[in-house]
Amino acid sequence: MIGRLAFASDPRTAAQEACAEALGGFDPDGTIAILSHFDADGLAAAAVLARALERAGRRHAIHLTGKGETPWDPDVASRLSAGDPAGLILLDLGTRATPVLPGCPTVVIDHHVPTGEPAGAITISGNGLSPEPTSALLAYWAAGALGDVDDLLWLAAIGLIGDMEEGRDFPELAEAQARWGKTALRDAVSLINAPRRTAAADAGPALRLLLSADGPKAITKGVDADSEALRAAKAEVRAAMEAGKRQPPVVVGDVALITLDTPCQIHPLVAQQWRGRLKDKIVIAANHGYRPGWVHFAARSASGRNLIDFLAEHRPPDADGRYGNGHAQATGGALTLADWNSFVRGLGIPQAQVLS
Ligand SMILES: [Mn+2]
């Protein structure tokens, strides 16, 4: 287990103390770089911390990982370094031993299964806690180190609902639903998650709304350009899903494989849909149209099988850090065509090989 929350008697206080300690190690006059995942949980986590830093008079710049990117890619490191950050906050991006910006004081806020302890960083991980807080709720707890963030509680709820696991019955969620409306929060999450699934994958409009809105209704009822962009994105993704839903699975042994060819990131949604219908199978939805030269895939199972272990057993020799991270019941990865083809041959599904 990584970080101190799992051992703390009160994870809320522990997260706040860890954040205070991390911020104390950043030059107060420097710019803090925030790098977050572009799903609702990551974006909401970034918005909570950015808004709390803003109020506390601390300079910050938000960066997002783009389509197919991980924080450990050289391109991401150079974008971050260009701003000469005094500190780095990593949100909802996984927890690995490798530093993202070596030498830069770093705090990791995350809830995925860690693959290592980042040396020299302060890690605020929800992994191992029950129920498991998502990154936005952890960020909300951590942001308490900067002042009163009570009015930003709805952003924590956006992240909790966005990651949509059962049993996340936090008092914060119930309170946010009572104050801002259950339906408004759910509808806002669906809109916020849409742009990153489109072919362009630009989460900018979603982030801007989370940085400025006073609640979910400002997003669901918004008539500004950013709100309209979210609705257009939702329509684009819905059309891609209509086609994706019609793809039949190929079932071989324990595995049900659905192959997709779309620039939209719908493979996790398709896998999630089939998971409920093929309860004893490992469902893999694979998309070779998402990014040229790569197959991106999502793996889900309702069988209780540990999918991170399953993927580790079938790991192609050249797979990198994009493969097999996440959660035991919700994982996936990205493989080059050659690695994908070796992966499906190993599963006994050679007909799923993708020719370049
Ligand atoms: Mn998350």
Image: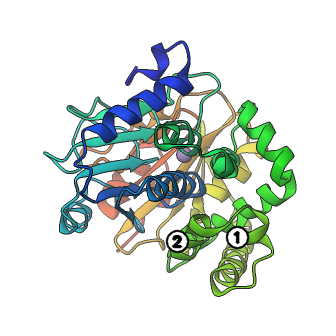
Q: Nearer the viewer, residue 92 or 201?
A: 92
Q: Nearer the viewer, residue 167 or 339?
A: 167
User: Looking at the rendered structure, which numbered label has been put on residue 241?
Assistant: 1
Q: Give how far across and how far down residue 310 sits, in percent.
A: 47, 33
Report which residue position mark 2 lands on: 203
Q: Quadrant of residue 292?
A: bottom left
- Which of label 1 and label 2 is nearer to you? 2
Considering only vertical position in the picture, is 77 above or below 121?
below
**Residue 32 left/right relative to 254:** left
**Residue 151 left/right relative to 129:** right
Quadrant where the C terminus sits is bottom left
- Residue in the picture at 31% in, 33% down: 122
Mark 2 residue type? Ala
- Residue in the picture at 66% in, 58% down: 269
User: Looking at the rendered structure, which numbered label has been put on residue 140?
Assistant: none
- Residue in the picture at 49% in, 59% down: 352
